[in-house]
Image (spheres, helix red, strand yellow):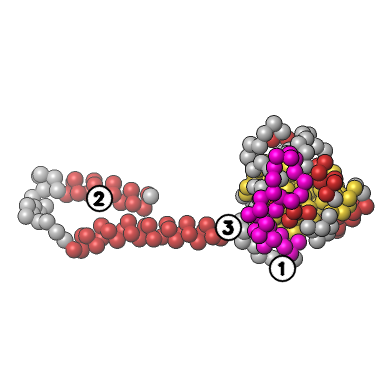
Amino acid sequence: MLAIVLPVFVLIAAFAFWFRASNSRAFYWPDWEFSGHLELIVWSIPTLVVVVLGGVAWFGSHDLDPYLPLPGKAKPVEVQVVALDWKWLFIYPEEGVASVNAIAVPVGVPIHFTITSSGVMNSFFVPRLGSQIYAMAGMASQLWLQADKPGTFGGFSANFSGEGFADMRFDLKALPQDDYAKWIAEAKASGADLDRSRYAELVKPSMNVSPSAYRSVEPRLFESIVNGTAPQSSASIKPALWATGQGARICGRT
């Protein structure tokens, strides 16, 4: 905007000074009505501004697309995220473990999050790593994040979802490869099996839930959550039949 505003102010002052009544050298054309060159200048400047700013916005928006995979030589880690009332469930489909209100990722490796909700819309947000994205029932959204250095990064729900919303917080721990492998091994050696019956208990509304881990996960549990065929927190919630096709497309490989 300054590229337009500043020249305008300068030209206003210059025209006012040059065409003052006491300047006998200033020309006066009372019958002038059109100039093609002037029209070209007047319209070309805002046109160029719109084209440049539009191009920056267009390409910049696509570069920041949360569905766009992050570049990297390392194989991405797949994490499936389920927003529950009022806690977060993280499923590692390739490692076969899961955790509640706690997540660990390897440093320097792209993390591909596939995100859904068991019911109420939520928002998955780790501010120090990237943008938020909504978690909604009957569909799966995606987000790519990467931690470039070890540390603990706070995450939370950025969308009001009821009584326990304020406690929907978790710690994302970025660990060196050896420590991450140890974290996965410890998860496999402790905790219970996350099958449909235990998920039916987990999906019930609860607050101030302490972090925990599951040593195994029932195959395709996440897809059944997306499709609405997994146990629900309320008997009044019915499967979204229209979501079955979408869930199969997004979650089919996991």
User: Residue at left 73%, top 56%?
Assistant: 223
Residue 65 disc label:
3
Residue 233: say if magenta: yes
Question: Is label 2 in contact with label 3 (beta carbons under 8 Å)?
Answer: no
Res 41 label: none
Task: Answer with mark 2 or mark 1, whichever residue precedes in sequence.
Answer: 2
The single residue placed furthest to the bottom in the displayed view is: 73
Can residue 125 be seen?
no
The spot of residue 176 in percent (x, y) is: 81, 56
Q: Which residue lies at the image location 78% right of the left edge and 35% below the top edge?
A: 206
Q: Residue furthest left?
A: 31
Residue drawn 76% across the image and 36% down it: 205
Residue 160: x and y, percent? 63, 36
Marking on residue 73 = 1
Give the image quarter of residue 37. bottom left
The residue that disc 2 covers is 11
Q: Quadrant of the C terminus?
A: bottom right
Q: Amino acid at mark 1?
A: Lys
Q: Main secondary structure of the magenta part?
A: loop
User: How far, Cα to Cα, is label 2 from label 1?
Assistant: 54 Å
Secondary-structure class at tag 2: helix
